[in-house]
Image (cartoon, coloured by chain):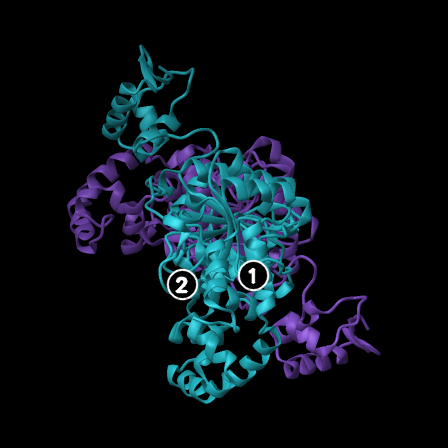
Chain colours: A purple, B cyan
Amino acid sequence: MMQFGLDEATVNELAAGVRPTDAPHGEMEPGVAGEVFARAAWTCIAEPGDGTAGVLVDRLGAGPALAAVLDPGTSGRLAAMLADTGGPEGSGSELEPALQRWRPRLSSAEVIRALRQAVRLSAQLAIPGDDVWPGGVDDLGPHAPIALWWRGIAPALASLPNSIALVGARAATGYGEHVAMEASAGLVDRGFTIVSGAAYGIDGMAHRAALASSGLTVAFLAGGVDRFYPSGHDALLGRIAADGAVVSELPCGAAPTKWRFLQRNRLIAASSAATVVLEAGWRSGSLNTAGHAAALGRPLGAVPGPVTSPTSAGCHRLIREYDAVCVTTAAEMAELVGERTLSLTLDLQAADGDSGGFGGRTSDQIRVFDALSGRSPRTVPDVARRAGLSTAAVQGALGALGLEGAVRERETGWVRGG
Amino acid sequence: MMQFGLDEATVNELAAGVRPTDAPHGEMEPGVAGEVFARAAWTCIAEPGDGTAGVLVDRLGAGPALAAVLDPGTSGRLAAMLADTGGPEGSGSELEPALQRWRPRLSSAEVIRALRQAVRLSAQLAIPGDDVWPGGVDDLGPHAPIALWWRGIAPALASLPNSIALVGARAATGYGEHVAMEASAGLVDRGFTIVSGAAYGIDGMAHRAALASSGLTVAFLAGGVDRFYPSGHDALLGRIAADGAVVSELPCGAAPTKWRFLQRNRLIAASSAATVVLEAGWRSGSLNTAGHAAALGRPLGAVPGPVTSPTSAGCHRLIREYDAVCVTTAAEMAELVGERTLSLTLDLQAADGDSGGFGGRTSDQIRVFDALSGRSPRTVPDVARRAGLSTAAVQGALGALGLEGAVRERETGWVRGG
């Protein structure tokens, strides 16, 4: 298939470069090269989350959609098709503005440059249907990524259905970093992959603790996987790319922008099985990730903190207003996505003061024990009056308390103690 | 009416002593003295929360119920009546055990001693129907108190329908005490009365802060109002009795017991409009108060804290498992019982990174601003390519951003900054 006027050999060579294969002579299956090249091109042309691009690619296939966009003669047919699909992104009136935003980027040189840079860095392109494709992102519908660029080991990417996203403030406190570390290590121990955004603060601590626990971890970036951001996390991202995976829907060379950070957040929420916010300010970007998780119906947890700490205000807001589950340990975070391992029935009636539980005692036994002294022996009628119980009830309770060694009988009456 | 063989003059004198009146010669209305005396006697005879006593008093009136219990010949009639009422406390088979537990306490001397001690301390007896009677406790049904002993000022007791209970751990942390202080003062500012249990830690701080803010505060005790407990809070309870109210369903002379603490907790929950737990261990007595609030359908709030703090574990448990509302400020606590004063709609799509909000900007404006530099002017086509937008969209966004002073045009293109 010809694309951007490129011959088939060139398309095949570029596509094969980002799709290593075990097949003889490194050849790709027929048709796959065109699909890979076209999806790579779409990541260069459309900004993340472009719903019109999503609908076109979904309806026509990536290659034909690209060809149609390159051919001005097809726009009438495209608009009619979009109008058929219904929905806000499917409105035919979306096509002309979309063509206008894609047109400035319809350059084969950019696509070729991104692909060559990817080959140089051993970055690969995952497309829907691949073993490593994170199925969760398909829940984004027309806003799903058209393809994902990634560096790292395939098992890390393939483990995303069994991952939990740990996100939070860049300006984390020592408390937040401590909790992130404990959460990440505890979830790795339970077999989960840790997803985050490689930012300073909570994100970085979550990745680090996963690596330190020999767990799998995946970082989603807002720019190309060739330019690690933030630069202070160069070494960390290098380790993630070696033992986990670094993923982006932007091609090599793309800079992170505010818009791309917001769109990256949707991938974190969609690719993982649950999202936990560890620390977040009142208007933190982590709330954006949380909002995506909630919109997708993914389990959402938030870790509480001191109400005096501004970096916990966003977490409390999620619990109050967004029904986020209050999670305080890795075990509770794991419960977000699976069966509860413990009975969590809270027997408030049996809840006791700080001085220690009174086990399974009946109310008669509590009242009789209350009425006894540790020193002065008391008779059964005296205990009955003090406890407000009948003598028969007191005798029954004393018998039970005696069996457990909590009271004993002396010559002149009963006392506490075995 | 004769009771315990006492003549009417004695009953009238004792009852009038705990019911100061403005009437000439301090006389009580006919019949009231007998009712007051009988209810006082019931607080001496039955332990708090005795459902059989509650049903009898409810059905017969306090005086006739007392007389019936004193006359062994009536037990058949009483049992039949109890059987008629249905419900667990109304079962006729409850009568004989009840008579057996009351019998050891059927002593007029105890009642007279309690009344005289109350008169000595200016303690009063509130009974259902009084202006100061906290109507909320009637929701306890057969477990409602038969009468309440109290010391203090009537407006404090009368304000209980507009109160919030602040309870928590005795072994509070500095964090918990700080939050209790802020909460109490903030709720007083909003016109609420502060209810608590006068214990060390959270309770004491809640009372203290209310007094310091010149607010009303009410302490419920597990023993008689003549013996302040804990003794270390003698001075504090004296101040509460002077400017607020100290309340108990136990008569003067009664010692606090574990059972009575648990029953006292039900009064705290039932008499106030909402209950907030500020700090509580995993098995704290405060969870018992919370359980009563939940069982009564009263709004229940819990203040989160560090997940590393054992004294916050009970609060997080209430939020996780008991649907307690996560409350972090006095304003949020006030919302538990009333209209929300602020729109709490959380616009997650607009939530921003730590670097500051982007106000009400559209996604086009965000992307255009992203694509600009603070130094190098960029042409509209250049910005369009970088932003992934059409030139028309870029021009529209630049116009809006220009109006708010976020961008400006130079000779060779657009830059950020006003």
Left/right placement of residue B31 relative to residue A165 reads: left
Q: Give the spatial CA distance, label 1 vs label 2.
A: 17 Å
Find residue B78 and report its horizontal and vertical position in percent. 44, 84
The residue sitting at 69% across, 69% down in the picture is A371
Q: Badge 2: few (under 14), some or many (20 or more) residues near its Cα, within 10 Å?
A: some
Task: Find disc 2 in the rendering and name its residue.
Answer: B138
The residue sitting at 64% across, 81% down in the picture is A393
* Pick the front one: B323 or A90: B323
Classify residue B388 by image quadrant: top left
Classify residue B378 by image quadrant: top left
Give the foreground label among 1 and 2.
1
Callout 1 amino acid = Leu
The answer to whether residue B221 shows anywhere in this view is no
The answer to whether residue B342 shows anywhere in this view is yes
Callout 2 amino acid = Asp
- Closer to the chain start, of discs 1 and 2, is 2
Left/right placement of residue A311 relative to residue A41 reads: right
Find residue A11 and report its horizontal and vertical position in percent. 41, 46
Label 2, secondary structure: give it: helix
Find residue B256 and report its horizontal and vertical position in percent. 63, 59
